[in-house]
């Protein structure tokens, strides 16, 4: 090796002697065992280093991301797979713990961690490479079913645990992102790209969060996401955030089941959550009334016409029917999963949660292997909270003594008819005047400026202004109806044993009026279309099938009852009957031919249905 002007690329020289002095502006990185490593990172460049070697090399400039300011192979070096830097995390063999420059024989494939079109992302990856070289190794994520790691930069050296959040805009912060997730950041939309971030909660393991690339909050939460209803998804995210911050639900004192008021971070009630296992006949019902009922009267316990512990599906199903028919009287309801210390859990679940939390605090290496830390989430119905409503019984008593204006009375009658249509279709077995709500706002003058001016004027001008006042400036009373507590609906047969479970609105004077043309125009065209009825059954099937105890045969019976109710309702609307006459019609079930295929499906001309009338009446018809 005495030939002058020889160009070298990727030459590794080792010597037991002291490192030779550098000539020119080269850099030298001594290895841990005293050997000298020389790397040529330039093409067609020559610098004399030592006469004894008889070679000419040039070194790459110092990399600011390299620990100690040593050299790394710079972009553009010859023989580096297209002139890109090598990744310290790729290669053959188990050499991940060895220094970067001691490795020569690698198979990098098509990936070289170089992104010329994204220097910001490239800087992040370079920091991760430098941290690995320094010994700040990645930390494996305990969640998920694949190998996913927290990769950190060189600044985070406190036990390998990330204590800071990470923002793309500030590359100096601690990197707490998996490289696999970083690779998926670029999506369609440019500035709206999202990246998933794991931050530390104040009371336990990392909490998942979402932020946009500019540091703002993203729109979608990690759980309980409804792509067809982003507004509802944001509300659920507010609830989850409040739970993580210690804003716990409040158990309602009313009712015979576990019903919780869910709040946001500001403490405002935004929803009502009813877990499946805390329903009136659930095994974790926190109320003692149903337990006493089961203990004292086991023969009369439960409702034989309903599927046990499907109240949360009934709540969501009633909301679905309301939306399909455009009734707009049921607060939006969805099936979600939530976990909170306020919910009623079994003793073993509480003990398991405490044990896992203690293990996570004392032995993190073991705790990170748990699939879940904390209490298990509960499935149930989440209904949006309505503000300003009171029990119908309260306002109905007031209306008996205070007559409503004609326009308000007509509007209330239309809402009442929508309630009748909803309850009859889903065959609600628990519709009393205490579980549907009315919101009534009295009339008031809308022109506040004119009212304030009248206070300042004389008595004479006050009299003149009151005479000339335009009555159009007075806003009419507003009234609206909300149908809640729909958890005891969708029976698989008509009540035929002890109780009839009647509709309590049938005793109201409004129920004696014939159905108006407004309700006929709203629902009759859809209910008369068998394709719409079949589509409604298909949508309910997609909702009900997620229950663990779902049975297709039982669901078909439920749909047979609903088809019969729709048939009676359609006939009553066509015959101009009243709600009282509707509930007096013989109940019927419409069964579909069992030889036909399952759900979902569309109705065809070959479909056959059988009508069956119920001949058995319950013992008590008034309760």
Image: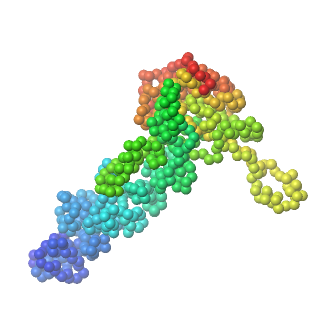
Residue 438 vertical placement versus 534 (above, below)? below
What's the residue at 40%, 59% (across, down)?
200
In front here: 329 or 619?
619
Q: How many marks?
A: 0
User: Residue at left 22%, top 82%?
Assistant: 24
Residue 37 in view of the camera = no
Asked if residue 379 is positioned above or below residue 2 in the image, the reply reads above
Q: Nearer the viewer, residue 456 or 186?
A: 456
x, y (%) of residue 145? 31, 48
Residue at 45% of width from left, 48% of height from top?
A: 341
| Quadrant (top left, top right, bottom left, bottom right) of the N terminus | bottom left
Image quadrant in which you'd find residue 501: top right
Q: Nearer the viewer, residue 129 or 175?
A: 175
Image quarter hosting the C terminus: top right
**Residue 122: percent from left, percent from top:** 34, 65
Residue farthest toward the front in the current orientation of the protein: 296
| The residue positioned farthest toward the top in the image shown | 615
Give the percent coordinates (x, y) of residue 428. Answer: 57, 31
Residue 416 location (% of width, % of height): 66, 35
State the image quarter where residue 513 is shown. top right
Task: Indicate how the structure is coloured in the image.
Answer: rainbow
């Amino acid at each position: 090796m005495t030939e002058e002007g020889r160009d070298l690329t990727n030459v590794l020289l080792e010597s037991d002697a002291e490192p030779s002095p550098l000539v020119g502006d080269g850099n030298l990185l001594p290895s841990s065992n005293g050997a000298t490593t020389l790397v040529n990172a330039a093409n067609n460049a020559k610098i004399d280093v030592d006469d004894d070697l008889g070679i000419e090399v040039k070194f790459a400039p110092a990399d600011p991301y390299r620990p100690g300011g040593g050299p790394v192979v710079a972009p553009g070096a010859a023989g580096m797979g297209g002139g890109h830097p090598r990744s310290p995390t790729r290669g053959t063999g188990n050499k991940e713990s060895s220094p970067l420059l001691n490795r020569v024989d690698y198979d990098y494939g098509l990936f070289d961690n170089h992104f010329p079109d994204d220097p910001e992302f490239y800087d992040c990856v370079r920091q991760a490479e430098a941290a690995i070289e320094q010994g700040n190794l990645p930390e494996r994520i305990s969640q998920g079913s694949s190998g996913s790691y927290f990769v950190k930069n060189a600044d985070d050296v406190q036990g390998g645990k990330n204590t800071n959040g990470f923002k793309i805009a500030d590359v100096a912060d601690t990197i707490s992102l998996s490289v696999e997730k970083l690779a998926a950041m670029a999506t369609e939309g440019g500035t709206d790209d999202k990246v998933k971030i794991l931050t530390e909660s104040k009371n336990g393991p990392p909490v998942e969060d979402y932020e946009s690339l500019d540091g703002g909050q993203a729109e979608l939460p990690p759980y309980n996401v409804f792509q067809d209803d982003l507004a509802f998804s944001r509300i659920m995210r507010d609830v989850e955030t409040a739970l993580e911050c210690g804003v716990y639900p409040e158990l309602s004192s009313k009712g015979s089941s576990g019903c919780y008021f869910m709040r946001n971070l500001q403490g405002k009630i935004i929803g009502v959550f009813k877990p499946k296992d805390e329903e009136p006949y659930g095994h974790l019902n926190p109320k003692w009334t149903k337990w006493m009922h089961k203990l004292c009267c086991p023969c009369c316990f439960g409702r034989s016409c309903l599927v046990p512990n499907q109240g949360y599906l009934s709540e969501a199903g009633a909301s679905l029917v309301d939306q399909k028919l455009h009734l707009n009287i049921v607060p939006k309801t969805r099936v979600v999963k939530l976990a909170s210390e306020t919910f009623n859990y079994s003793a073993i679940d509480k003990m398991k949660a405490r044990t896992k939390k203690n293990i996570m605090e004392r032995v993190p290496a073991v705790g990170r292997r748990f699939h879940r830390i904390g209490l298990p989430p509960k499935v149930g119905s989440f209904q949006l909270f309505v503000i300003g409503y009171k029990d119908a019984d309260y306002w109905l008593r007031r209306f008996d003594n205070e007559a409503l204006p004609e326009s308000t009375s007509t509007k209330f009658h239309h809402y009442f008819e929508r309630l009748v249509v909803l309850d009859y279709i889903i065959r609600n077995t628990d519709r009393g005047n205490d579980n549907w709500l009315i919101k009534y706002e009295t009339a008031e003058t809308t022109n506040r400026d004119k009212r304030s001016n009248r206070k300042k004027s004389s008595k004479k001008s006050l009299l003149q202004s009151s005479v000339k006042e335009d009555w159009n400036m007075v806003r009419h009373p507003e009234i609206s109806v909300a149908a809640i507590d729909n958890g005891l609906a969708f029976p698989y047969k008509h009540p035929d044993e002890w109780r009839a479970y009647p509709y309590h609105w049938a005793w109201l004077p409004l129920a004696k009026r014939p159905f108006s043309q407004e309700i006929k125009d709203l629902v009759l065209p859809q209910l008369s279309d068998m394709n719409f009825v079949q589509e409604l059954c298909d949508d309910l099937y997609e909702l009900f099938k997620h229950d663990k105890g779902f049975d297709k045969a039982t669901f078909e019976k439920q749909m047979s009852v609903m088809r019969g109710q729709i048939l009676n309702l359609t006939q009553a609307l066509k015959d101009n009957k009243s709600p009282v006459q509707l509930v007096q019609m013989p109940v019927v079930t419409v069964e579909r031919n069992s030889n036909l295929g399952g759900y979902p499906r569309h109705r065809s001309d070959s479909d056959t249905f059988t009508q069956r009338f119920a001949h058995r009446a319950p013992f008590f018809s008034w309760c």
